[in-house]
Amino acid sequence: MKAEIITVGTELLLGETLDTNTHYIANVLKELSIPTYFHTSVGDNIERIRRLLNIASKRSDLVILSGGLGPTKDDLTKDALAEHLQETLLLDDEAVDKIKHHFHKIEKEMPENNLRQAHYIKNSHILKNHNGLAIGMVTTKDNVMYAVLPGPPSEMTTMVEKELLPFLKEKIGGVFVSKTLRFTNIGESALAEKISTIIDAQSNPTIAIYAYTGDVTIRLTANGRTTQECEEKIKQTEALILEPLKPYFYGYDHQTLADVVIALLKEKHYTLSVAESLTGGLCQSKLVSVSGASDVFSGGVVTYQTSAKEKILCIPSELLLKYGTISHECAVAMAQNVKALYGSDIGLSFTGIADEHAIEDKASGTVYIGIAMPNKEPISYCVHFNRGRNANRELSAIFGLNKLRELLEEKGEHYGY
Amino acid sequence: MKAEIITVGTELLLGETLDTNTHYIANVLKELSIPTYFHTSVGDNIERIRRLLNIASKRSDLVILSGGLGPTKDDLTKDALAEHLQETLLLDDEAVDKIKHHFHKIEKEMPENNLRQAHYIKNSHILKNHNGLAIGMVTTKDNVMYAVLPGPPSEMTTMVEKELLPFLKEKIGGVFVSKTLRFTNIGESALAEKISTIIDAQSNPTIAIYAYTGDVTIRLTANGRTTQECEEKIKQTEALILEPLKPYFYGYDHQTLADVVIALLKEKHYTLSVAESLTGGLCQSKLVSVSGASDVFSGGVVTYQTSAKEKILCIPSELLLKYGTISHECAVAMAQNVKALYGSDIGLSFTGIADEHAIEDKASGTVYIGIAMPNKEPISYCVHFNRGRNANRELSAIFGLNKLRELLEEKGEHYGY
């Protein structure tokens, strides 16, 4: 089976949107050991999509299309495929109900166009959209299989995981098992170098590395006759990988650092409060993104201005004058005082310079993170980031959560300042 | 002139490398007002590259290739192009000298293969590589122009900026100007419907609509002899578009809602503090993402637990018992009390249910947003979202910032609860 990927959207051709869907789908196809020979992006133009389908159907057995399923007249992927296959489009009742229900719920009148999102081609296998309204489908004609997926990444990836992958796996036969290992505080190339011999020797499971801001993941996918056989294969490779990488490992699959921290707090019966300056609420927002965080996250403050540090967090002005707001002393005082203010077991704090200019003689990207644990001397860490204002803020929040995780797992170096 | 972009490299098809070159080149072409109709990625296979060039030469006037110029036998782009054009490859003396000099400098023997990086096609215009050894070129045959660029992003972008762009600009002449209008509190399809006659009549400027979470943008791009002529054309279309859409419009180009709110606060000499429950710091983080926010953003609290609302924000327990935490009354009290706590001019608050389960008899996705303006009765808004925990949190933060923007612009309906 030879595959190709087609992403549809004028915004891709205009360079307004970076196409990450192709990269994602290419990895999924690699997991299934389906070779991919072409990727193409095309604009929202029915004639050009049709011409492309004509070319693709002559050189590939599986054509995966993503994008152009929305409600506007610019969204033409299904129309182009129907024309190419000389089929007509039908309305899926379930999808129509869902669209109508959506508009009823938000108390808005439904523009007639929206029903286009319920279109499918006769005899095709419908792919449900768990994160949106436009359904996808898989349809086969003249030995070529076409899979149609939505463009928004959250809708596309969920449809692939929950709908397309199970369908393709059944077609292919055998069992596939995947597991993702998550790492932080290490770069993609440094990580790859540490396991280069394992990567070079990979066959089953396959090893795929992805990098995000402050986060690197390794996805292992094994193929075998039974789930147990696959899991055994993954277990062996996981052990090899974690040997050099254990210090950077924090979780599995979809776990975020915030998930891990919230789970550890629950396990240890600790509550947490947070005081943020440069991160401005970002760390707290990550914690609140976890459902059920309220059991252990007491809340916190954003003391962005110096006066707020004095007034709300009661940090003595003498301390701020002597050491400055960007200091070990200020970070520790913020952690201790937010802990006292909220009556929580643990206090976490962030103060530093996100921007690309120096403040108080401290270089840009200098961040102090304070942690006040129960019955221990409060500590603080000094880190330097150089990635621009908002990436520096993101990296700071991740670094702080990771240090707290290490302390909760009792692995962190526990030193005073 | 119609363009297409081809990126060459098996690592792209395997999903090992995210293709950012296409995105970069697409933006450069947009600047030049050269429409791009196709992007394709292909592996390091001479036959498949040749077949792709054959397809491309029939549908495009400008074919930009990137990747596959290195010294190894996998690097086949120039060979494929030479075969396609039925031309032979020659060695560029200057490039040969540079390669030899390089190996002399690093004191290594030069593998003969490395001279392949000095290859060019007869009569082509050579593009120098300022960051590496492999030269590029522009060559024209049968009215199709082919530009060949290296794959490593640092080499490719420098070659485009210093070599290809000046060459293409001279060829084209004329000017392109773009402007983006930003809207919120309206969906993509509803927005498109309101200006459908304008969209249908578009030619110059072109109109492109993009949707993000809580945000829709319209990008106008005009082509003309002078910048002034383009700006005049954009001005006319902008006026037509804003007629039905003015209530949803909030800014231009890269402006975020937080940018607009911070700018308005500065203009009016107001300071702001924020109290967040379900949004958990997300709104404050958006404000802090704006450089210079500290001039007007005093800070705030995350009172996620009910006890924190009482203790930190001093909201009377009787109020919470009588009306619940998810109520107009609580939102207003939070806004008033955070304003008093920080001594700011304005208080903004968020309380509600992000999750998909009901609390206090309020449906999931129910959010109350309170705003205490200077010298006015505090107000609150009740909204319903149904997009899952974190999208609901995002939409809440955006809705609150937008309501504040309207009040600062003195456009908002100002009603008590």
Image (cartoon, coloured by chain):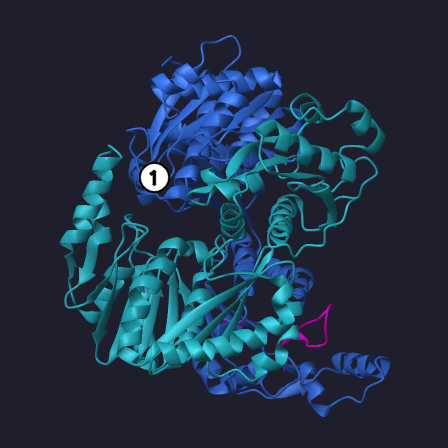
Chain colours: A cyan, B blue
Expressed as whole percent of the image width and height from the top left, the position of residue A121 reads 18, 64
Q: Is residue B384 above or below residue A132?
A: above
Q: Residue drawn 30% across and 35% down?
A: B358
Left or right of A125, for residue A381? right
Q: Residue drawn 80% across and 28% down?
A: A319
Is residue B276 at least partly visible in the picture? yes
Residue kind at label 1, given as amino acid type: Gly
Residue range in magenta is B124-145
Task: Examine the structure image and report whether residue A248 is included in the region drawn in magenta.
Answer: no
Instruction: Specify the farthest residue to the top.
Output: B375
Expressed as whole percent of the image width and height from the top left, the position of residue B22 reads 52, 64
Q: Residue drawn 44% across and 54% down?
A: A11
Q: In this rendered view, identify the residue nearer to me: A109 or A184.
A: A184
Label 1 Cα crowd, 10 Å radius (few <14 / some 14-19 / many 20+): some
> Circle 1 is placed at which residue position?
B187
Left or right of B284, for residue A56? left
Q: Secondary structure at mark 1?
A: loop
Left or right of A47, for residue B2? right
Expressed as whole percent of the image width and height from the top left, the position of residue A136 reads 27, 60
Is residue B9 at least partly visible in the picture? no
Task: Examine the structure image and report whether residue B137 is included in the region drawn in magenta.
Answer: yes
